[in-house]
Structure formats: C-alpha cells, structure tokens
Amino acid sequence: MSEVPPATRDLLDFIAASPTPWHAVENVEERLRRAGYVEVREHDPSWNLDPGQRGWVTRAGGSIVAFRMGNKPSLEAGMRIVAAHTDSPNLRLKPHPDRQRHGYATLGVEPYGGVLLHTWLDRDLGISGRVSTRSADRRIETRLISVNRPICRIPSLAIHLNRGVNKDGLCLNAQDHLPPIWALSGDSPEALPDIRTFLAAELDVTAEAVLGFELCLHDIQPPTVSGLTGEFIHAPRLDNLGSCHPAVAALLTTDDLGCEATAVVALFDHEEIGSRTNRGAASSFLRDVLTRLAGGTRQALSRTVPRSFMASTDMAHGVHPNYPDKHDGEHRPVLGQGPALKTHHQWKYATDSEAMAVFRGLCQDANVPLQEFVSRSDMPCGSTVGPIIATELGLRAVDVGNPMLSMHSIREMASSQDPPHLQKALEHLFQAARL
C-alpha cells in the first residue's frame, strides 16, 4: 500500500469529528486555540491587531473567520484570503418530527441542500447538531450534541415490491419515503419515543427545558482509506470539509514564516442552500471582519482590496470512468493529479484569466500539479461562495478544489494524495508578498 500523507489522515480524523457545521467550527476553534490564536467577538469594541497577532471570530455557530495579521499594514501588503464552506447536504429533523406509522416510530425529515437521496437508504444513521435549552434561571444555553451510534435507518423497499426499480430507476418522495425508523411504536401512546425526551436524556436536562434544536442525520461509518494501494479516501462531507481542512492547515503551517500580507481563512455555513443568510457568504460577516482588519473604515478596506487575492476552495467534479460524457472532453479532472481550477463564462465561478495566471504561478512555484474544470456547454453549472464574495468586495479571485466522485452522496470519494497538494498551494498563497 502506498503511503497515505499525514495531512490526509488528519483530514479523515477532522471529518469524523465534524458531523455538522457546528462541530466543524468547534473543531477548527480548538486547532486555532492550540496554535495560540485568540478568540475575539463581533461586539468587542476593539481587537488586538498588531503585526503577527492571530485570532478568530465566529457567527451563529456555523461560520468562522480566522486571521493572522501581516508584518506589513494591509494597505501596503493586502490580504490573502481562502474561503470555503462548513455545511454539507444532509437530512435534518423537522421541529415536530415524531410520528407513528403502521407500528413504527419514525422521524420527519427535510432535505438540506442538494441531497443525493438514494444514498441515504439502508445506512446506520446517527443524530447530531445543536440543542437550545432554558435553565431554571431562564438563561438560554446552546449545546452541541453528537450521537454517533445507530439510532435510525431509512430502509429501502424490497425488489419484490418494486419489480421495475432496476429498469425504471428509483424515485423517492422526500415527504413519504425518507422518514427514518427509530423504534417500534407499541400499543400504548405513552410508550412512543419522543425526540425531546431523547435529547433531554442525552444532555441530562428535563424534556421541558429543550426549547429548540437543529439536528442532522449522518452516517456513522467512519472515513477510510481504500483502493488497491491506498490511493482513495471514502468519507462523508468531503464537500466541503475536504477544503476547510487544508485551508486551516495552510494557515497554521505558515504561522512562523513572517508573512507580509494579512492571512484570512473564512469558512461559511449555508453555502449548500444559497449563502443568503445571516451567516452565509452573502451576509455582512466577512466584510465586517475585513473592515476591522484593514483599519476600521470602509475607505481602508477599499484601498486594501486591490492588493488582495482570494482562493475560493470547493471540491471539483472528477471525471467518472462510467460516465465520461458528463464532462467536457478537454476538461476532465482526474483524482490524484492535483486540484482543479474552475472557470465559467457566466460567472458561476470567480476565476478570470488574470487570477488564473496568478494561481497557476503559485502552483508552479510550489510544484503542485494543477488541472482545469469547465462544465459541458449543454449542462447547468453549480456555483460556490467565490462569485458572491468577489462581487461583494471587488476581490480578484479563483475557484479551485480537489476533484472527487459521488459529490453530495452520503459517502463521497477522493484521492488520498490530493489534500496535501491543495494545502501546499494555499501555503504559497499566504506567503506571497506580491500577486
């Protein structure tokens, strides 16, 4: 078996510990804290922004911006920004999920983002997220919860009851076919399981104290290395924790190199549902933080932006050996051959020719292989946080990401060799004095 890079092993551990965006942010915070970063808050009247100062700020639990002040003022050296997103498509519990169906206790769920629904069938599913409770002194406390054991399952329909499924395809109705089973309902209504009672037991509070929750189902099967020689990784949430991890790792790796430019890693929640929320990439969050880092005024930020550069990092579609016609013939990224630059002339991606040249030069300097992705002209194209941020701030930017297969499946696939490639390219971005 070929050697799996330590960065890849660490990525898999990070994914396993991050079943939800809130857990991902919590784990990023812990890595930053261990590296000497200091948490600041949006409502703090002032932040310590001396040269070399390192910190982070969060919003609404699912989004985080980490920064390291450069040795030169941002007005002179600009900023080097890496953006990604913490959320992934999944199934989330409804506010009143408890229901009884033909002797079974099931949970009402709603798809979050573009879920590849059939991949959620016949999986051992846990429940994780965040729960808000009210204490005896009327304080609201929000706590994370992770139940990483097989609590529920969405069983598929036997072929004997759906004879045409292999010929006609599987069609799932999200309302009727996706509620997972988590218990037998029994004969007594009092014996029915209740989500609030379940959460109260897990958190050691009363059921009456549970006033709100955001809960995600997730596959409890851990990430793994696979392939004949260990060339692949299989894991949930590679889109897009597979970009969050190298972004943070690149920031921490370059901490002691005396970089001139201010380095920023911005990880957003809600990309999978359009980013237009109070914590998404279209919110004021990043602009508010960058304004403070630039000197506290809008004019200071507007003067900093022309000297700045952003890499929007989101996983890319690798060519599928069984469906090669789904790719443009000249733009077919292959797993294991480095990250892919993504372009789209209708601006679904933020890359233009100048920014492409800048990033390509960085990869050449770093000895990082680089591929390109362009969608077929007769197929719609997805998007990222890149165009949103570039439009809002006027930043030069590229969209780039490691190629993968099974995007938006409950369990995705990528190369074990590509995570260090992207991390190395981002390290060179943070170190670049002039772009």
Image: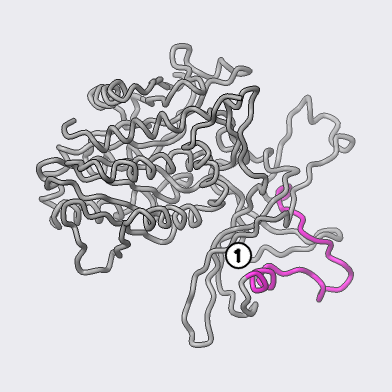
When the figure is inspected, residue 30 is found, relative to residue 356, above or below; the finding is: below
Point out the residue furthest to the top here: 329
In this image, 136 relative to 424: left or right? Answer: right
- The answer to whether residue 399 is seen in the rendering is yes
Q: Answer with the quarter of the image where residue 314 lies.
A: top left
Colouring scheme applied when the structure was drawn: one colour
The image shows residue 99 at horizontal and vertical percentages of 74, 63
Image side of residue 159 versus residue 268, left or right: right
Callout 1, which amino acid?
Answer: Pro
Question: What is the x, y in percent for residue 223?
Answer: 61, 41
The spot of residue 5 in percent (x, y) is 49, 32
| For residue 163, side relative to residue 364 (left or right) | right
Residue position marked by numbered label 1 in the rendering: 95
Q: Nearer the viewer, residue 341 or 376?
A: 341
User: Is 170 one of the magenta-colored residues?
Assistant: no
Q: In this view, does 424 lie above or below 153?
A: above
At 73% from the left edge and 42% from the top edge, which residue is drawn?
121
Q: For residue 201: magenta?
A: yes
Magenta residues span 176-202
Asked which quadrant contains residue 29, the reply is bottom left
**Which residue is nearer to you in this view: 251 or 78?**
251
